[in-house]
Image (cartoon, rainbow, N blue to C red):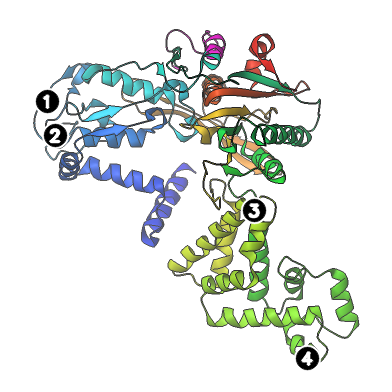
Amino acid sequence: ALELARAAARDFEAERLRAGTLTFQDLLMRAVAMLRASPEARRFLGTRYRRLLIDEFQDTDPVQAEILFLLASAGGESGERRASGGAARAQSGPAAGADGDADGVVEPGAWIDLAPRPGSLFVVGDPKQSIYRFRRADIELYTFVRERFERFGRVLRLDANFRSLRPISGLVADVFDREEAFPREATPYQAPFAPLRVQRSDGHPAEGVYCYDLPDENRTEELVKADAKWIASWIVQRTGEGGDRAPGDFMILTRQRRHLAAYAGALEERGVPVAVSGAALVESEEIDEVRVLLEALAHPDDPVRLTAALVGLFFGLSFQDLASHVRGGGRISLAAGAADEAQPTDVSRALAQIGVWTRWAREQPADVVVQRIVDETGLLATAAARPLGSLRAGGLLYALEAVRRAALDGNTSLAGALEALQAAADATEAEAPLEPLRDDAVAVMNLHRAKGLEAPVVVLAAPVGERTRAVTRHVRRDRDDGDAVGGVVVTERRGWADAVLALPPGWEALEAEERRFEAAEDVRLLYVAVTRARDELVVARPGGKGRSPWGALDEWLEQHGKRLE
C-alpha cells in the first residue's frame, strides 16, 4: 500500500509539473533539489545573495532551513563540516559537497554538516512563539539549528520588550515562569522562560489586564453569540463620542476560525468597521448561487436544475410563483419561454434570461460568461451590501479569479468553471477579504494569524472548549542527523468518525510523546495571545465549566484582573 501511495504521489507531482500547477511546497522541494545537485547553482546564488537575514525563524520548516544553509555555505569560503564520529573540522574550497563527493552533490540530510560563510546568515527567532508544529516548523528544529549556531557562529539573547506595558509583563512573569509552563532550562518539548524587560515608559490611562464573565450557556453557539454581542457593545462605547479609542486600536483573537464570523457580524451590525483575517470564505452563498446557475446553463433541459436557479438568488422566485406559472399553462422549460412571451410572467421572463445566458455559454469561454453575468446582475454589489459584505464580496472575487485561472490553464468549459467554483467554496486556507487588514478597523482573527502582529487593545474571545484532537502522527528530529523519525496512523472515514486501519509499532508510547509536544505548544499559543497586547489585555471567561483556551489565566485573573461589567 505504501509503495502504491508513493507511486501515486510521484505521478501526481509529474502531472502538476506538466500542467504548470506546482504548489508552494513543490517549488520549495524543487529548489532544494537543485541546490543539492548543482554546485554551480549554489555558487551562483550564494555569490548573488551574500547576506541572508531571516526573521521569525521559529516558523521555518526543515526544507526552508536546508535552503538557507545551502545558500549561505556556497559562493565563497565553505564552512565547517563534521568528520566521522561527529567532530567538527574546517574545510576550504568553493561549494564543496558535505558528503565529500567530487561532483559537489550534497546528499539529503547532509546540510546539517555545513557551516555558513562568516557573516552570511543572521536569524532572529523566539522559541516561545513556535506554534506551527502542524506545518513541520517544530521547536526541535529551532533547537537543532540554534545548537549549530553555537558551534560556527554566535548566539545572542534579546529580551528587551518595546511592545507591552508593565501590567502585561507582570502577567507573563506570574503565569509563564513556572516549570509546567516555560521551565528554567530548555527541554525537548519546551522553550525556557525569559522575562519581558519592558522598555516603554509612555503608559496609557486604561493600561492593565481585564476580564469579564459571560452567562452560563450550554451551547457553544449561544456562548459565542453572547460574547460577540458584549464585545461589540463595549467597543462601541470605547470608540463613540467621548470615547478614548479608535476602531483600529482593537484586535479580537479566537482559537478557532469558525467563530470569527460571529464577532465580525456583531461589529458590523453596530456600524463598527471590521477587518477579518483567517476566516477563509466564511460566507460562500453567492459562490453557491453562481454554481447553481451554471448547472442550469450546462443542463438547460433539466427542469430540476432550472427550478433551482429560478428560486435562487438571481431571480428570487417562490415555489408559489412556479406553481401559478404551471397552472396557467406554462412549463419549466427554456423551449416554453418564447411561447409565453405573449402573456409574460416573472417565470417566463426569468426563463428567457436563462436562455440568453445559455447562448452566451455556447459561444464564449466560461470565465467570460460568468463575469458578464456577475456584472449584469450586480451580484458583487449585492454581496457587498449584505451582512459581512466585505467577506462575501471578497470571496466572490476570489472565486471568479479561480474560474479565470482554470480558463488560462485551458479549461474554458462550464464544467471547468464549476470545478473551480467548488474548489474555491471548499478552500480552507483561502483568505479573500474585499479590503485586506485596514488600520482603521477592528482586527478579528484566529490566533495563528496574529503571529508578529500587535494592537493597543487585545481581546481574547470565544472562551469555548475544544474537542480533544485525535493524534494520528508523531514526528521527531533525530539528534545526530536531523532526519524525521516517527509513525503515522492509517485511518478511513466512516460516517462521522475515523476508523483506524493500521498502527505503527509502539504507537501507544509515540502517541503519549506527541501529546507532550501538543501540551507544550498549547502553552506557547497562550503566550503568543497574551503578548500581542500593547496597553490593554481583555480576557473573556465562560460562565459554565467548559474548558476555555484561556483557562490557564483564570487563577491570575481572580487575584489581579480588573473586572469589566
Task: Label 1, secondary structure: give it.
Answer: loop
Q: Is residue 294 magenta?
A: no
Residue where numbered disc 1 is placed: 91
Viewer-side residue, 182 vs 24: 182
Residue where numbered disc 2 is placed: 96
Q: Nearer the viewer, mark 2 or mark 4?
A: 4
Under mark 4, the amino acid is Ala
Q: What's the mark number on residue 461?
A: none
Viewer-side residue, 59 vs 446: 446
Q: Is residue 186 magenta?
A: yes
Residue where numbered disc 3 is placed: 389
Q: Nearer the viewer, mark 3 or mark 4?
A: 3
Point 28% across, 34% down: residue: 68
Name, please, the residue furthest toward the right. 327
* Number of residues whose C-alpha sits closer than 10 Å to that of mark 3, classed few (under 14), some (14–19) or many (20 or more): many
Q: Is residue 20 visible?
A: yes
- Marks 3/2: CA–CA distance: 57 Å
- Marks 3/1: CA–CA distance: 61 Å
Q: Give the dominant element type of the magenta stretch: helix, strand or loop.
A: loop
Up/down of 22 relative to 138, above or below: below
Quarter occupied by residue 143: top left
